[in-house]
Amino acid sequence: MRIHRSFLVQLALIAELRLTNSGYVVVVDGTELPVSRRHTRELKDRLVRAAKQDWTR
């Protein structure tokens, strides 16, 4: 999934979504990557959907 114009990540590799002073970041393999405002909403929605699918299994 695109999280920023410079970054594509697999949802399964995202360990954490964190709000910082400068906006949202995701943690992938211990590295913080910025999430653009444009992609924040879709990222949150997809992470929630993925979590719900895991709960039902």
Image (cartoon, rainbow, N blue to C red):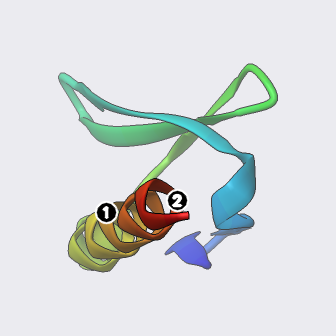
Q: Taking the image as drawn, is residue 54 in sight?
A: yes
Give how far across and how far down residue 23 sits, in percent: 24, 40
Left or right side of 13 for 50 = left
In the picture shown, does residue 29 fall above or below 42? Answer: above
Give how far across and how far down residue 1 sits, in percent: 61, 79
Residue bearing the label numbered 2: 54
Q: Which residue occupies the foreground of this view, 46 or 29?
A: 46
Foreground label between 1 and 2: 2
Which amino acid type is shown beneath numbered disc 1? Answer: Val
Report the residue at 36% width, 64% height from top: 52
Give how far across and how far down residue 51 sits, in percent: 42, 57
Residue bearing the label numbered 1: 48
> What element does badge 1 sit on?
helix
Extreme residue in the front direction = 57
Q: Earlier in the sequence, mark 1 or mark 2?
A: 1
Give how far across and how far down residue 48 sits, in percent: 31, 63
Left or right side of 10 for 18 = left
Q: Which residue occupies the foreground of this view, 50 or 6?
A: 50
Q: Residue 57 sits in which quadrant? A: bottom right
In the picture shown, does residue 47 fall above or below 8? Answer: above
Report the residue at 81% width, 29% height from top: 29
Q: Taking the image as drawn, is residue 4 in sight?
A: no
Would you say the residues marked 1 and 2 are in contact, meaning their CB atoms lie under 8 Å apart?
no
Q: Which residue occupies the foreground of this view, 27 or 55?
A: 55
Spatial CA distance of label 1 from label 2 is: 10 Å
Q: Residue 44 sits in which quadrant? A: bottom left
Which amino acid type is shown beneath numbered disc 2? Answer: Asp
Report the residue at 51% width, 40% height from top: 26
